[in-house]
Image: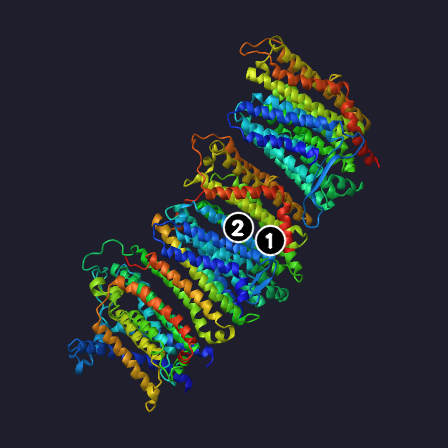
Amino acid sequence: MKQMAMDLSPEWILLVGIALILIGEILLRENSSRFILGLIAGLTVTASGLFVILQGKEVISLFSDSYVSDPLIRSIKLLLIVGTLLVVILSFSEKLAAKGEYYLLLLSALLGAMTLVSAAELVMLFVSLELLSLSAYVLVGMHQERLASSEAAWKYVVYGGASSAFLLYGMSFFYGLTGTTSLTEMSGNLAVAFTNNNEMLLYLGFFLILVGIGFKIAAVPFHMWAPDIYQGAPTTITTFLAVVSKIAGFAFMLRFLGSLFGTQGIQSVLHGVVIPALLVLSILSMIVGNVIALKQFHLKRMLAYSSIGHAGYMIIAIITILLGGESVAYSSLYYYFVAYLLASTGTFAILQVVAQDKSPDRRVLSGLHKRSPLLAFCLSVFLLSLAGIPFTAGFIGKLTILVGAFGNSLFWVAGIMLLTTVISYYYYFRLIRQMYWQEDEKAEKERVSWSAGFVIALTLIGTFLFGIMPQILLQGIGSWFM
Amino acid sequence: MPISKSFLIIGIFFLVAVLLPIAALTLGRFLRASKPSEEKATTYESGVNPIGGSWVQFHVRYYLYALLFVIFDVEAIYLFPWAASYDVLRSEIGLGILLEMGLFLGFLILGLIYAWKKKVLEWK
Amino acid sequence: MNTLLLYLGPVILLLIVLGFVTYAILAERKVIGWIQGRIGPNQVGPWGLLQTVADIVKLLIKEDTIPKNADKTLFKLSPIIAFVPAFVVLAVMPFSSQIQFTDIGVGLLYYMAISSITTIGILIGGWASNNKYALLGGMRSAAQMISYEIPLVMSVVGIVLTVGSLNLNDIVEAQQKTWFIFPQIIGFVVFIISSVSELNRTPFDLPEAESELVAGYHVEYSGFRFAFFMLAEYVYIFAMSSLTTVLFLGGWNAPFGFTFLPGIVWFIIKFSVVVFFLYWVRATMPRIRVDQLMQFAWKVLLPVALANIILTTLLKEVPFLTHYY
Amino acid sequence: MYLTSYLALAAILFCIGLYGVLTKRNAVMLLFSVELMLNAVNLNLVAFSRLGFFPNIEGQIFTFFTITVAAAEAAVGLAILIALYRKKETAEADQYNSLKG
Amino acid sequence: MGILSILLCVPLVGVLVLQFFPKRKFSAHRVIANLTTFVTLILTIYLYFPFQTGQEMQFVEKVSWFTFGSFEPISYSIGLDGLSLPLLMLTTLVSFIGSIASIYIKERTKQYYSLFLLLEVGTIGVFLATNLVLFFFFFELTLITMFFLIGIWGYSKKERAAYQFLIYNGLGSAFLLIGIVGIYVYFGSVDYDSLMKVIPISSFNPFTWTLLTLLLVAFAIKLPIFPFHRWMLLVHVQAPPSVVMIHAGILLKMGAYGMLRFGVSLFPDYMEYISTLLAVFGLINLLYGAILAFAQQELKSVLAYSSISHMGIILLGIAAANQVGLQGAVLQSISHGLLSALFFFLVGALYERTKSTQLENLGGLAKSMPIYSGILMVASLGLLGLPGLSGFVSEFFSLLGLFERHPIYASVGTLGLILAAVYTLRALLSVSFGEQKKSISHQDIAWKEWLPMFFLVVTIVGIGVYPDLISSTLNHTLETIVSDWRG
């Protein structure tokens, strides 16, 4: 009992935090400041992160293997926590956060993401995923006075609901044909199931699940929701979706595919169906995401497409992990996560500062270098990191993925990756151009709240640090889970 | 009694329950008067001609109650199995089983108080 | 023989129920009259015994009008939807240790689940009429029914906790020594209040509040279609009283070891007491306001019901009381 | 074979739901369609749980959770729809088109 | 920290110091930038003396940087050999003069000089890096800084120029990166010295073939070789002259350097195999550039096409694939670097006065601006390869080398030299002589301008008269490369 409490401590803490915020919201008067709740949220997330670190290298398995936690999983949890923490800090200066629910939902979404990462059983996977999604639906619609926000939330609900149905439908086939919902047992039974003359149903199930996962990580052709939702959602929540939700989705993908198709018994399926399907997803995501981003005028929309492109890159890393060809595979994915997290969070933080309540189309950046040279510089760095230019973390991320892809002879994909990267230069640099070349009559300096400033500074330092001295992180990852 | 037979009986109950109104209404058709007129087929509105459509927009409170209902009704799904197997689980797992449901209920109660505070429960 | 009984049983029960309804209505009017110092129906037949029969015949030959603007299919369907579950729930009711039509393991859940279908029938009726009063009445009725369904469902969790089963027979068996009305008194109070509300009876008869909403969801209904809404309501009285008896009053168990009367008789006695109680409430209570009605369910009954659950589990741990829980 | 017919029914339900999601214009109908898809899954799970190759109770437990989640999803969806409806005064989903590039 | 690292850090320190000055202190920015580039120049000159001719990499610094899985660690490794030393000296010299030439930049000087110094870090780094990944880092740094420099301070079509530059070179970088990663995965290392050991002489298979092609395409875009040259024209015309000095003077040579360093010396067999192809491309560049330069109506365009033409000569030298040819290629790089720096300095000075570089608007400058015209004359003569100036030596060596291998191509190549004379003289004549246009002010250049120009002229003459200044350090390195090759 006590052991279980300890093993689940990060999740417990989040739960306590949720309860505290709920109580706080009940006790606080309607028009008093909600800052204290934000503080509670921040502290809770931090504490949860500390406990994740405290758990160290032990391997935990609870509830007859439906909850597992090992260093590898913990490293991703840490990422989710850091992402959420940044969003929480960013929210201190956000009007929306004047509602207690905001932090509450943020924490519950994080809780969902954390259990999602740990879940090794279909029911738990599904419930965690939904906890994450449902909280996110509401968060997206948080801007109640803004039509776009509600509309985005609505679209998210419909697309999200349909995609969960796909996912579940696929899961039901896997359950039915292997007779278990536990992933470990399932992987044992899967080889038999494939020889049971029912492999068509399993393939069907696999593709259905792929639809569900593809939706979650916004991979083409299941990406339609992302631009609308990124655009309509409050910027802080867009950050959350782009970072935490996405990383959790990838972790889910990795867990599911890795534990089912990573086994020896069904290598033919892995190579014959799973990998080609992922390749298609990846290539489509890279091309469509980056090409359509070229046409976008609205910044958040553009970043949405760019994040679709990034999803494509990350899928390559997943493929290399599944192929198991290179030991760098996992660290490359992780590195990419980190780089993406830092750069995206920073970008959105600056967008929030610059655009304030306006709809952020490209023009808000005009002449930023004059108004706030530091902000312009930071945004440039983040964009360069997203574009994968050396001296930023993004480059090392791309490099590691490329090495992995080459190690597994995925030459064409690597080529497409680089080609689309070059395409992506075009729209990233266009923003830089907007900042440095276009003049704007607006002369007053941007007011950067301390919280946004903190987040921007942190992500900037991270982007440079991991870009110039990647060893810190690479070794860190290596020593942690190897 | 095998389970299929139990449901057969329920099916018979259902059939009987459906047949009764059908039979009664069919019977009534032969007995009752039938003199339809324009006025009779008008929608009733306190004796005046109906104004506007009647499928009006409902007050939002109905939806709020519906949402609350869904939440607590679904909660019941978990409460019943838990309650039914409480004794068994109590001896197997110990007080943890109480704790778990206490947590579950606690959060629901918190949610209820929250809704209360947010004036969802008011009928305005 | 068995097969025949299988098919005849429900029909017989239906006839009994219909008979019950016929005289329950009369009895209600008589009882209320008596409580309020009136005479009640006394014109048709001796003591007005044929009053209800006459009413039924009147409804039978009354013209059946359907408003022009109504959604015809749903309009016709809705009384049936409202009535069917009321009768179907009786299938699992253990009237005595012998008389029970079927025993499915989750009788209690079955009752709760099926009975809530009626709400849909009422809602459809209100909507299909295409009438403002009907619609409003239907909506109110639905809101009320779903609001009170929650405490109703929660109030019996205490019993399930004690018995460890959802089977109605097991629940009755568990009450051989102590009726649940005593250890589960809180649950009982919540249950009975909720059930009165579920039955749309005074003081919770707002959906049919004539002074406010003309006649509620069935304002456009006439003749036998109307009769079926009424019938459903009274069949529910039958069902709900039976359930109350089973859950809280020990079912067919004889009190104080008075086993000289067969179980079914005890059941009928207890059942009658519950029915009488319902009449009594109706006769003495004023109708409450709509806002009070809804808030009462959520702010009073539901917390109390939840508290009851927790209390029950806690009492299970208390040394001497464990026996009762 | 029993199982096949259940699976076929579930598949039909799922497809009807999917068709609804793709074609329906009324927002409430969209929600219904999604629910239909989820219910198809429930049917599948229960069928596998009783008649599958490895009948066991897990499928039914799964169904419990699915139902819950579906209910929560419907609740959230409805709440968001109401918020949207108050601003837009229409439930036609193709009128919700202010988000564009 | 070794001297090479210090060399890399000096401009960075300059950037840092710049940040402490307010935006409007233009002159302070200028002084700091000039000082910084001057220090780098002094440092490289200082390097020249302890440099041991006849040895491999010197001043080597190697620190493990980061590791992936089981691969050999990627290290921060820099070094200097006979091939990179001349180019390094060229870099710091041109940077210094470029920073002086930046007096024509009059707005946002803080940003300008910061980027300029960063660009210098990039260019120095490219020539110092002996690790492919590190090389790529610096390579990209030049890309980014150039993008800004062109885009912000360029002329009317600066945006298009910047974008063309970015996309073409980005594409080139992508090819380069694929090549690097391929080499890393295939040979397990990206360090120049370990690659020299690892890559067997007979490592000729489709995979390496593809890798090499990618690398070459990347460098070809940078150089640029004929079908990939469009971006460069725009940059030459649209970028501010001081930036073009760096661009034409150094950045183009990075392509040549890359081909020599990672193509010729790592994969000699392969280079030999495609030498004919290279020669053909070289000729196309040479003739195409020359012919089109003749047709241009604008001074900067003339220079742009002449750059293409001269890059053709470098390519011919590489195609020769022997010591003399390679020597010619390197010499041509340096010579052209100096000449184009001088030329664009001159163009900048001219534009400052005339506000136009259209040939038809110019003319008769020899009368009003004698010093200017004199220097212009020297530069032109250097460009057309007059003996005694650096251009002659390099072209001579390149063609000499080519004669040994492809005599026919070489003889066609000489045709290009004649054409060069034609277009250069045409441009020179229409600028310096002829009828003087009244509409423009003709103030002769000040000492601040002609002094650095003069400095360049001295260097050009110096190399022309005594090419051994460079060849001596170069020769040994090339010898080892070529001897590896034949072995």
Q: Is residue A285 visible?
A: no
What kind of element bears circle 2? helix
Q: How far from the left and from the top, in percent, is residue E225?
A: 68, 30
Q: Is residue B8 above or below residue A105?
A: below
Q: In the image, what residue type sits under mark 1?
A: Ala
Q: Nearer the viewer, residue D62 or E411?
A: D62
Badge 1: chain ID: A
Left or right, residue E78 beside residue A126: right
Note whether residue E142 is visible.
Answer: yes
| Image quarter of residue A105 | bottom left
Task: Answer above or below: position of C99 versus E236.
Answer: below
Between marks 1 and 2, how big is the CA–CA gap? 31 Å
Residue E266 percent across, percent down from the top left: 76, 38
Q: Which image quarter: residue E391?
A: top right
* Viewer-proximal residue among C263 and D19: C263
- Residue at 34% x, 50% y is A31
Q: Are marks 1 and 2 in contact (CB under 8 Å)?
A: no
Residue B19 appears at what percent x and percent y?
34, 74
The subunit carrying tag 2 is A
Query: Which residue is identified by label 1?
Result: A277
- Coloration mode: rainbow
Which residue is labeled 2 in the image?
A82
Query: Which residue type does callout 2 highlight?
Result: Val
